[in-house]
Image: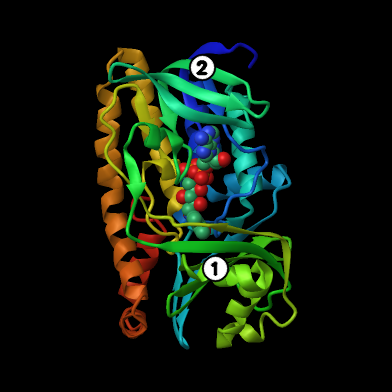
Amino acid sequence: MTGRRSTYDAVIVGAGPSGSVLARLLALQGANVLMLDAAAFPRRKPCGESLNPGAVNRLSQLYGDGKLASFRGLLNAASIPFEMLSGWRLNSGGVTLEAEYPAGLAGIGIRRESLDYWLVQQACDAGVQFEDRCRAERLLWENDRVIGTAARLHNGEQLLISARYVAGADGIRSAMARSAKLSGFGKLRKAAMTARIKGVQGLNGKVELFVTGDTVIGLAPIGSGQANMTIALRSNQLLESAKIGKNGFLMAQAQRIAELRERFSGAEIEGEVLTCGPFERIVQSNRYDGLLLTGDAAGYFDPMTGQGLYRAVRSAELAADALIEAMRTGSFAPLHRYERQRNYEFAAPLRMQKLIEGTSRHEWLLRTSMRAIGASRMLTTRLAESIGDCVRL
Ligand SMILES: Cc1cc2nc3c(=O)[nH]c(=O)nc-3n(C[C@H](O)[C@H](O)[C@H](O)COP(=O)(O)OP(=O)(O)OC[C@H]3O[C@@H](n4cnc5c(N)ncnc54)[C@H](O)[C@@H]3O)c2cc1C
């Protein structure tokens, strides 16, 4: 991109999974699309790095022939390491609840920088123009209508980008949602630290969650002998990590869990430990013509159930349908319909996430619930289907 002013059918702000999926779907329909990202790609993203079966299914539909094997084949062809995930195991004070995903469905543990960069490349192959190290700063307006975005390149140059539509896919702290005064923090004050660990024993192709007090440790194999370890904790506990160093803090948290002590005896952190938080972001329904929000930019609650990637991909699909119809008809009505449809699809999963997060704060309640659910095969399967986003498959 050379000019200071350019015009596009759509500018997509953010090249995470939501932005890349959306940008590619629009370009495949012949739209002239620019996608911007503030980061230099490939980039890491704080995440538990497990795609649930719902997310794997959507990606298999979008990039393969709909079958799990085709998506695995694409990752293999791109030499991206990954690990299949057959279910999850929840552990709290020695009480365990274990669930398998329904037959034929699986999750995938994968490094986010590899997945996200591959998705960017797929978008570029479809004709999307991509500019990384380019931060969108604010929306451009004409009365109450969004007509583009002002962005800044890494060298400080400002760009005024005109577009018929702006899609904010710029994550939890979406500058686009803030620029439209649609977003604010929620009450949940949780933060997270995430690291890659080598040498963890006993990984068994499942996402494992260990809940004690206010802390949740997630462990997932991501291929090449590494595991992702993500700790969600109260925001003020991060101050403690500043005293003893992130690596020491993370390992000390694992040592507090009896079931992990032995398994972590030869474990080592590889690479940088990332921190983020607080997560909860409340975003009002968009009421402006020309603007649309997808993925985390449209609102986020808590990472515990690992459903963010499904939402990112699924909301991008819904957004693409709406934008294609809007481009064809010249009406903004499909964009407003998209808001209602997204809210409708995600309302029940969000209620379930809130229920699980609330329960996890009271250990006795969590353990009692785990025992009750574990005693019923039907309830265990339903829970696995629900948080695996398998319900609509
Ligand atoms: C600790 C933690 C653990 C998680 N674990 C899981 C998990 O295991 N499984 C799961 O499914 N979900 C998980 N999630 C949620 C998941 O990471 C997100 O839901 C998902 O990344 C959302 O994708 P996205 O494309 O909407 O946003 P992102 O992936 O956040 O991408 C947004 C992009 O926008 C760019 N950007 C930001 N601001 C600007 C700007 N102003 N201009 C230009 N670009 C900008 C960023 O650089 C980034 O590349 C977790 C989240 C957290 C916080």
Q: Which mark is residue 273?
A: none
Instruction: Give residue 25's position: percent from left, percent from top.
Output: 48, 28
Looking at this view, is 143 or 368 the one in front?
143
Q: Which mark is residue 160?
A: 2
Quarter-wise, where is residue 273 in the image?
bottom right
Q: Is residue 359 above or below residue 339?
A: below
Specify which label sits upstream in the sequence, 2 or 1. 2
- Pointer 2 residue Cβ closer than 8 Å to ligand 1: no
Instruction: Give residue 100's position: percent from left, percent from top.
Output: 46, 69
Q: How is the image coloured?
A: rainbow
Reading the image, the residue beneath label 1 is: 239
Instruction: Give residue 45's position: percent from left, percent from top.
Output: 59, 50
Q: Amino acid at mark 1?
A: Leu
Q: Residues within 10 Å of mark 2 (few under 14, many from 20)?
A: some
Query: Is residue 90 visible in this depiction of the protein?
Result: yes
> Does residue 281 appear left or right of residue 266 in this picture?
left
Instruction: Give residue 101's position: percent from left, percent from top.
Output: 45, 64
Mark count: 2
- Asked whether the residues under the numbered discs 2 and 1 touch, taking CB atoms below 8 Å apart as contact, a structural biologist would say no
What residue is drawn where x is 36% and y is 46%? 299
Tell me the element at label 1. helix
Quarter-wise, where is residue 197 in the image?
bottom right
Tell me the element at label 2. strand
